Amino acid sequence: MKTILTYFVFVAAIFTLLVPVCGHSQSAGDAGGADYYALVKRLKNNDMSINFQTLRIAYTRTPDYKPYGGSEAKDAALAALNKKDFAGALKFAQTVLDTNYVDLHIHLLCRVAYRETGNTEKEAFHTSVLRGLANSIYTSGDGSSPEKAMVVISVPEEYFVINASGLKVLKQKSLAVNGHDYDAMDVENKKTGEKKTLYFNTDIPRQWLAKNLKKGN
């Protein structure tokens, strides 16, 4: 994964103060027939009552879902933010959001850029969206074991949780337990030095990968 720029990581670490580590879990099941585009439309109209876990899972059923692919627009947005070119960062960020409205790093970027440019209304909007998306991951499990793994739809979500929790990765390995796929991340608290292992359920991205590899054969 491309290393996130220093300024961006600093803000991500602060964001842990805004993300509730516990709370009411949003159970989405398999998201049923939820329409990702309809949910995004509601969200853009400031409807924060949507189920954010359902939104994330619904996104994985769209043609734009690519859990392992990079994004030139995202890299450009982060580079612009690092240079404090907030207008440029927002321009590239919008390109990302046009095809992936559940990208936590981009909503964080927008929150920072709008704060720095004095647009408090849009800063508040992206803060609320980011909180909803992040909380839907935190409440899916505490990550203490495979059985309590946090459910993610992409590798960047794993790193968002790790950075926002003030942790750094020491070692990563993939494993399968009882028919499910997991990433086990050995992490260390940047302040206290405490070490532990966080587990992420990666069924959704792994199933996408298996399906697309099969298509390529």
Image (spheres, rainbow, N blue to C red):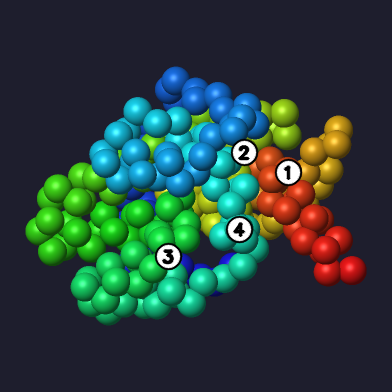
Mark 4 is surrounded, within 10 Å at the Cα level, by few (under 14), some (14 to 19) or many (20 or more) other residues, namely few
User: Can residue 40 be seen?
Assistant: yes
Q: How far, Cα to Cα, is label 2 from label 4?
A: 21 Å
Q: Give the residue type at disc 2.
A: Val
Label 3 or label 1, whichever comes before in sequence order:
3
Q: In what element is the residue under mark 1? A: helix
Mark 2 is surrounded, within 10 Å at the Cα level, by few (under 14), some (14 to 19) or many (20 or more) other residues, namely many
Q: How far, Cα to Cα, is label 2 from label 3?
A: 22 Å
Q: Which numbered circle lies on residue 203?
A: 1
Q: In what element is the residue under mark 2? A: strand
Write the residue at 57% across / 28% down. 28
Labels 2, 3: front one: 3
Q: Do the residues labelled 2 and 1 touch (CB within 8 Å)?
A: yes
Q: Give the residue type at disc 3.
A: Val
Q: How far, Cα to Cα, is label 3 from label 1?
A: 24 Å
Labels 3, 1: front one: 3
**Left or right, 201 with reference to 13:** right
Label 3 or label 4, whichever comes before in sequence order:
4
The residue beneath circle 3 is 96
Q: How far, Cα to Cα, is label 3 from label 4?
A: 14 Å
The residue beneath circle 4 is 63
User: Can residue 192 be seen?
Assistant: no
Labels 3, 4: front one: 4
State which quadrant residue 172 falls in: bottom right
